[in-house]
Amino acid sequence: MGMRYWAWFLAKLVVAAVGLRAMLKLVARIFPPNKDPLAPLNDGIRFLLCDLALMLCFLIFAGALYLIVRDQRYRCRVCLRRLRMPIATGSWSRILQFGRPRIEYICTYGHGTLSEDDLHISGLSSAQWTPHSEDIWAELCASGKEANRP
C-alpha cells in the first residue's frame, strides 16, 4: 500500500478532529464553567444540558470516525478512487466447489481487487487487497490462453 493511501486517511482524520474541536469550543462557550462550588445543585437544568451537548459531541465524533474508516476501506490503495462493481463469489450450498461466499470490489483502473467475506461469523475477518500488474490486458489475455490449452 502506498504512502498516499495512509496520507489521505490521516488528512481525513485531521479535518474531522479540527471540526470536532471547534464543536467542543462552541459547547464550552455556551456553557462556561461556574465558579460556585454548589453549581450542579443550583443550576441542574443547565448542568444536564451541558452533559447532553457533550454526549452529542461524542456521538458525532464516533460516527465521523466510523464513516472515515469505512470510506477508507473501500478505496483503491494506489489511486484512492472508490472501489466499484461488487461481485458475489462462492456459495454456501456448494462450498466445496466454489468456496465461502465473498464479495469482491475492483478498482476501475485495474490497480487491484478487494475481497471480503459476505457473512462475518467468526469475529473480525480482514479484507484481502490483491494488487494487479500495470498491464491489466496482459493478465486478462494470460487467463484466456491458459483456458485454451489442452
Image (cartoon, grey):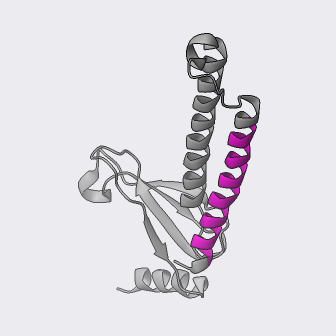
- Residues drawn in magenta: 4-26
Q: Is residue 89 above or below residue 54?
A: below
Give the x, y percent position of residue 100: 32, 53
Residue at image position (72%, 49%) is 19
Residue at image position (62%, 72%) is 7
Query: Is residue 22 one of those drawn in magenta?
Result: yes
Give the x, y percent position of residue 67: 60, 48
Residue 78 or 33: which is nearer the viewer?
33
Quadrant into which the C terminus falls: bottom left
Say how many tags the image has: 0
Residue 85 or 32: which is nearer the viewer?
32
Magenta stretch: dominant secondary structure: helix
Give the x, y percent position of residue 117: 39, 53
Furthest-front residue in view?
36
Residue 70 or 26: which is nearer the viewer?
26
Give the x, y percent position of residue 59: 58, 35
Q: Is residue 13 above or below residue 36?
A: below
Q: Is residue 138 above or below residue 31?
A: below
Residue at image position (60%, 84%) is 137
Residue at image position (38%, 59%) is 126
